[in-house]
Image (spheres, coloured by chain):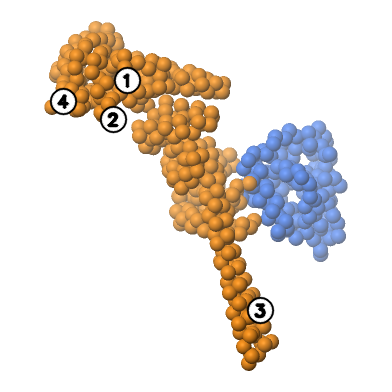
C-alpha cells in the first residue's frame, strides 16, 4: 500500500568505518499515504550500524529544522545489531504531519548514507561519524555558552540537532541559551521536544516550567517544576539543580498563594462589610420597636459585632504570614528551615537530606543531635513529615517565601 | 579588634546566612537567660554580653563573648572567644580562648549560638576556683601571632569543671 523504494547496499567491512553512498532519484511519490523506503543489504559479521538518510530537496522539506544547511533533512537511526550472515533490510517510515508537506516530496532526490562501523560500535566506545561531529558541535556550543556568546552557541547546538535530532541534551542546551536571551517561547518549544525524547530530563522539565511561568501559566508551570524536582531528587539529591529548582518552585508557589490569598482576603473583606451592614440594619429595625430593652439590645449588638469580627479574623488566619509560625516539628534542626526532603536517622531524628549528607561528609559520621554513629546508608526518607510539610504549605502558602 | 581578627574570613554561604538569620530571630524572641546580644548589622560576628549566674563565683560580673562564623557554618563550628579581660577560670586562657570540646572536636551542626552560650555559662557556673589554666603563659605566648583557637590541638583532659 505504500510506495516503496529499494536500494541495495553493498556490504563492505574492509575499511573502518566504511561508507556506502548511493544516490537515487525519486520520480514520483504517491502523496496521500506515507512514503517508505526500504534499504536492503547483506552482512556477514555481527555488527551494529547507524543509518542516516538524507533527503535533498530544493523546496519545502518535511518537518524543517532551523539550520544553516536548511536544504537537507536528516533522519538518524539508533544502532541495532544484525544477525550473522543474514540479509537485512531497514524500513524508513516518514511520519506524516500535514498532507501538504508530504506532497512536497514529489521530485525529491535521496542520498542514502549507510555507516558501518566495526566491533567498537557494539561495545559502545565508538560513535558514528555524525554523532561524533554532533558531539564536537555540542562542545563548541558549551564553550560559546560559557563566554556568553549565546547566538553562536545556539548555531552550534542547532547544527548538532540537525545531525542527531534524537539527542535530548542538544535540545536542552539550546533551550538554556534561549533562556538566557529571554526567548521563552523557544525555550518551551525545545524543552517539549527534549521531553518527548527523554521524559526523565530534569533540565527540560525545569526550563519548561520556567517558560510556562513566564507565560503566566502558573499551575502548569508549577506542575513541571514539581516533576523536575522529583526527577532531580531521584537522580542526584545533592546536585545544584535540586536546590535551584526548589527555589524556583517555592517562588512560583508563593506567587500562586499571593494571587489566591489577595482574592480570598478581598472576598472576606467585602463579605465582612456586608455582614456588618446587615447587623446594623437589623439593630436599627429592632431599635425602632417601642417595647425593647434598649441598653441590653445595644450591648448584645456590640457583642454580635465583636463576634463577627472574631469569626472573620479566624477565617483569614491561614493567610497571615508571620515569622516563626512554621512549627518546629516541620523544620530541620540544622537549617532551622521548613523541610524540603526530610530523611530520618535510626535515632528517630529527622533532617534535611542535603544538609545531613553534608554533615556526614564534612563533620563526622554521627547523628548531630544524639551523637549516635550514623552512616549515609541508614538514612530513610520520612514520608510522613514530607506529607505534613506539603499539607502545611498547601494551607499556608506564605511559608514558601524565602528570604 | 582582637588578635583573632587576622584570621582570614570569607563571606557567609547562603545556607549559613539563612540559618544565622533564623537564629537571630529566635534569639530575639527567646534569648538564653543571662545573655545579651549587642545589636550590630554584622551577621558574621556576634558580640554577646554574659552575666555570671547568681549564686556562683562569677555573680554580678559581666564579660563579652565574640562569636565569629565561618563560611560553612553550621558545618563548621564558630570561633568563640572572650574579649579580654576574660573571666578567671581553669579552662579560659588570659587571651580569651576557651577550652571547651563542643567548640572544636565535638561540634555538631545541630548546636546553635544559644546552646553554646548555655554550655559556656554552665562551665563558668560549675567552677569553684578563680584561676588560669596551668599552662596559661606557655599557651598565650604560642598564640601571640594571632592564632585562632580553632587551630589549637586541644586536649580535653577534664570535664568536671
Q: Which residue is mark 1?
A: A60
- For disc 1, the neighbor class at 10 Å (few under 14, some 14 to 19, many from 20) is some
Gap between marks 1 and 4, in whole Å? 22 Å
Q: Earlier in the sequence, mark 2 or mark 1?
A: 1
Q: Which residue is mark 2?
A: A97
Q: Residue at x 62, y 81 (%)?
A: A283
Q: Pointers 2 and 1 in contact (CB under 8 A)?
A: no
Q: Do dots 2 and 1 share one subunit?
A: yes
The local secondary structure at tag 4 comes to: loop
Q: Pointers 3 and 2 in contact (CB under 8 A)?
A: no
Q: Pointers 2 and 4 in contact (CB under 8 A)?
A: no
Gap between marks 4 and 3, in whole Å? 86 Å
Say which of marks 1 and 4 sits in front: 1
Residue A249 visible, this orientation: yes
Q: Which residue is mark 4?
A: A2
Q: Residue at x 70, y 59 (%)?
A: B30
Name the subunit of mark 1: A
Say which of marks 1 and 3 sits in front: 1
Name the subunit of mark 2: A
Amino acid at each position: 500500500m505504500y510506495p516503496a523504494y529499494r536500494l541495495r547496499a553493498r556490504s563492505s567491512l574492509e575499511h573502518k568505518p566504511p561508507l556506502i553512498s548511493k544516490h537515487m532519484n525519486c520520480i514520483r511519490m504517491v502523496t496521500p499515504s506515507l512514503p517508505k523506503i526500504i534499504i536492503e543489504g547483506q552482512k556477514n559479521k555481527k555488527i551494529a550500524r547507524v543509518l542516516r538518510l538524507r533527503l535533498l530537496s530544493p523546496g519545502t522539506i518535511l518537518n524543517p529544522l532551523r539550520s544553516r544547511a536548511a536544504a537537507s533533512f536528516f533522519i538518524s537511526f539508533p544502532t541495532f545489531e544484525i544477525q550473522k550472515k543474514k540479509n537485512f533490510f531497514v524500513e524508513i517510515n516518514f511520519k506524516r504531519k500535514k498532507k501538504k508537506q508530504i506532497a512536497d516530496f514529489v521530485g525529491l532526490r535521496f542520498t542514502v548514507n549507510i555507516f558501518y562501523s566495526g566491533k567498537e560500535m557494539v561495545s559502545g566506545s565508538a560513535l558514528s561519524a555524525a554523532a561524533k561531529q554532533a558531539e564536537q558541535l555540542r562542545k563548541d556550543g558549551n564553550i560559546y555558552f560559557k563566554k556568553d556568546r549565546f547566538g553562536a552557541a545556539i548555531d552550534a547546538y542547532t547544527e548538532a540537532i540537525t545531525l542527531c535530532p534524537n539527542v535530548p541534551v542538544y535540545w536542552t542546551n539550546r533551550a538554556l541559551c534561549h533562556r538566557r536571551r529571554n526567548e521563552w517561547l523557544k525555550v518551551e518549544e525545545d524543552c517539549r521536544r527534549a521531553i518527548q525524547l527523554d521524559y526523565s530530563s530534569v533540565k527540560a522539565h525545569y526550563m519548561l516550567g520556567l517558560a510556562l511561568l513566564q507565560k503566566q501559566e502558573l499551575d502548569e508551570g508549577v506542575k513541571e517544576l514539581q516533576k523536575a524536582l522529583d526527577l532531580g531528587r531521584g537522580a542526584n539529591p545533592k546536585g545544584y539543580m535540586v536546590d535551584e529548582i526548589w527555589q524556583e518552585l517555592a517562588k512560583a508557589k508563593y506567587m500562586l498563594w499571593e494571587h489566591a490569598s489577595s482574592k480570598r482576603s478581598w472576598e472576606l473583606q467585602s463579605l465582612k462589610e456586608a455582614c456588618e451592614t446587615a447587623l446594623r440594619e437589623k439593630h436599627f429595625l429592632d431599635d425602632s420597636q417601642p417595647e425593647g430593652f434598649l441598653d441590653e439590645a445595644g450591648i448584645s449588638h456590640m457583642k454580635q459585632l465583636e463576634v463577627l469580627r472574631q469569626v472573620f479574623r479566624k477565617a483569614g488566619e491561614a493567610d497571615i504570614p508571620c515569622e516563626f509560625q512554621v512549627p518546629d516539628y516541620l523544620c530541620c534542626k540544622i537549617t532551622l528551615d521548613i523541610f524540603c526532603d526530610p530523611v530520618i536517622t535510626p535515632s528517630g531524628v529527622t533532617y534535611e537530606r542535603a544538609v545531613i549528607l553534608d554533615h556526614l561528609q564534612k563533620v563526622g559520621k554521627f547523628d548531630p543531635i544524639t551523637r549516635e554513629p550514623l552512616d549515609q546508608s541508614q538514612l530513610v526518607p520520612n514520608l510522613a513529615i514530607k506529607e505534613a510539610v506539603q499539607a502545611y504549605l498547601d494551607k499556608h502558602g506564605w511559608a514558601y517565601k524565602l528570604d | 579588634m582582637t588578635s583573632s581578627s587576622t584570621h582570614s574570613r570569607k563571606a557567609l554561604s547562603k545556607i549559613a546566612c539563612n540559618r544565622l538569620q533564623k537564629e537571630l530571630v529566635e534569639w530575639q524572641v527567646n534569648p538564653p537567660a543571662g545573655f545579651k546580644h549587642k545589636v550590630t548589622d554584622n551577621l558574621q560576628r556576634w558580640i554577646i554580653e554574659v552575666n555570671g549566674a547568681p549564686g556562683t563565683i562569677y555573680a554580678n560580673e559581666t564579660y563579652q563573648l565574640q562569636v565569629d562564623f565561618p563560611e560553612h557554618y553550621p558545618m563548621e563550628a564558630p570561633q568563640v572567644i572572650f574579649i579580654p579581660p576574660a573571666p578567671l577560670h581553669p579552662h579560659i586562657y588570659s587571651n580569651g580562648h576557651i577550652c571547651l570540646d563542643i567548640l572544636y572536636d565535638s561540634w555538631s551542626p545541630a548546636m546553635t549560638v544559644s546552646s553554646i552560650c548555655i554550655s559556656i555559662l554552665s562551665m563558668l557556673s560549675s567552677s569553684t576556683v578563680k584561676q588560669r589554666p596551668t599552662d596559661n603563659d606557655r599557651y598565650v605566648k604560642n598564640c601571640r601571632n594571632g592564632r585562632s583557637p580553632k587551630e589549637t590541638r586541644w586536649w580535653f583532659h577534664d570535664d568536671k569543671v
